[in-house]
């Protein structure tokens, strides 16, 4: 079976989760093609070609694809789709925007956030905020699937797939790119960080997040937050971990002042080791934590930071 993986990128390299999507695609079929669409995206195409398991890269150069406007990207994917049994994307901000449009234009049912490939037409996906798993089977001729990157081990580099130039479809005029205000940080990006420290409502203010920033800097960790902390205005919404935020599965996840609502647990419970710090010993977060510390976070976090410094 021929699989088409649609790769998001920054113009120079594909996103790290493309390697996870290629791994998932390899479980659906052996012939994996990666589509890299953009303006001046030759370097990104080369980075896709270097992924093991990729048989071919399609490079679509068009000014209309410079900013990944979904209404322009989707028609290109739909044009290519009849040559493939599956269209696969990572379930990130791009995939969640483009894939539903592709599925609608193809008149097929999308399989969202697959965490396991049972067979080429059968997938496991979480439902009810991750509290149950559904095994779904699709009879559609072309299967549109988004995968949860944290559940598939990324393929390594070292490949040398050929790159084929294809034409673009141009702008469709349905929407236009105005601009973006992107937050910048020296810390690791949440979805790829090996260590993540998240704060919740228990921190009481945005100013108190500096406690976590200091610890994160010492550990080289990404900084996250619960929805309650984001809704309260303590931190920007790109910090949010959970069902309606980012899904992470680091080697170490430290939850500080987070009660552990199911929506938050859905975004981090696959972490390898979970440490929870909360003054309420009945907090739901302790049900999934490997290590729990009951106490005042304003005392414990500085002590933990000092211990890390000594180590």
Image: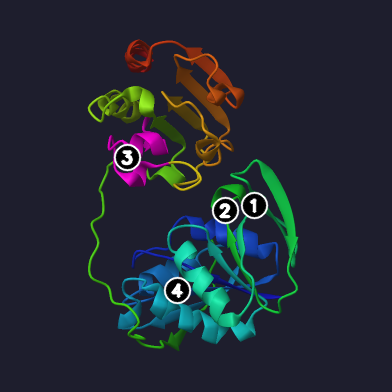
Magenta part of the protein: which range? 219-240
Residue 146 falls within the magenta-colored stretch: no
Report x, y in % for residue 304: 38, 15
Residue at label 3?
Answer: 187
Q: Which residue is mark 4?
A: 36
Residue behind mark 1: 115
The residue to which callout 2 is attached is 148
Q: Secondary structure at mark 3?
A: loop
Viewer-closest of 44 and 266: 266
Q: Nearer the viewer, residue 309 or 120?
A: 120
125 relative to 265, above or below = below
Tag shown at residue 279: none
Earlier-in-chain disc, 1 versus 3? 1
Q: Is residue 105 above or below residue 189?
A: below
Q: Nearer the viewer, mark 3 or mark 2?
A: 2
Mark 1 near mark 4, Cβ–Cβ under 8 Å?
no
Where disc 2 sits, the SS reads: loop
Gap in angstroms between the C-alphas marked 1 and 4: 24 Å
Q: Nearer the viewer, mark 1 or mark 4?
A: 1
Secondary element at tag 1: loop
Image location of residue 161, percent across then percent down:
54, 73
């Amino acid at each position: 079976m021929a699989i088409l993986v649609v790769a998001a990128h920054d113009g120079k390299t594909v996103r790290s989760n493309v390697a996870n999507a290629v791994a998932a695609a390899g479980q659906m079929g052996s012939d994996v093609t990666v589509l890299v669409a953009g303006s001046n995206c030759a370097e990104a195409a080369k980075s896709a070609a270097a992924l093991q398991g990729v048989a071919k890269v399609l490079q679509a150069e068009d000014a209309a694809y410079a900013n990944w406007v979904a209404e322009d990207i989707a028609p290109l994917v739909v044009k290519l789709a009849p040559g493939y049994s599956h269209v696969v994307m990572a379930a990130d901000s791009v995939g969640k925007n483009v894939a539903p449009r592709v599925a609608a234009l193809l008149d097929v049912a999308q399989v969202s956030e697959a965490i396991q490939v049972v067979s080429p037409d059968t997938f496991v996906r979480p439902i009810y905020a991750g509290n149950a798993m559904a095994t779904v089977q699709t009879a559609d001729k072309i299967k549109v699937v988004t995968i949860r990157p944290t559940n598939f081990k990324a393929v390594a580099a070292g490949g040398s797939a050929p790159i084929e130039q294809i034409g673009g479809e141009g702008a469709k005029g349905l929407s236009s790119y105005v601009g973006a205000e992107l937050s910048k940080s020296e810390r690791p990006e949440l979805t790829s960080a090996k260590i993540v420290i998240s704060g919740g409502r228990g921190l009481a203010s945005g100013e108190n997040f500096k406690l976590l920033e200091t610890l994160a800097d010492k550990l080289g960790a990404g900084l996250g937050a619960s929805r309650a902390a984001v809704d309260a205005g303590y931190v920007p919404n790109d910090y949010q971990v959970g069902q309606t935020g980012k899904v992470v599965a680091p080697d170490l996840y430290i939850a500080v002042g987070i009660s552990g609502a199911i929506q938050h647990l859905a975004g981090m419970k696959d972490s390898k080791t979970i440490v929870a710090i909360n003054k309420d010993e009945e907090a739901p977060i302790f049900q999934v934590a490997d290590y729990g510390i009951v106490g005042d976070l304003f005392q414990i976090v500085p002590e933990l930071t000092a211990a890390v410094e000594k180590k």
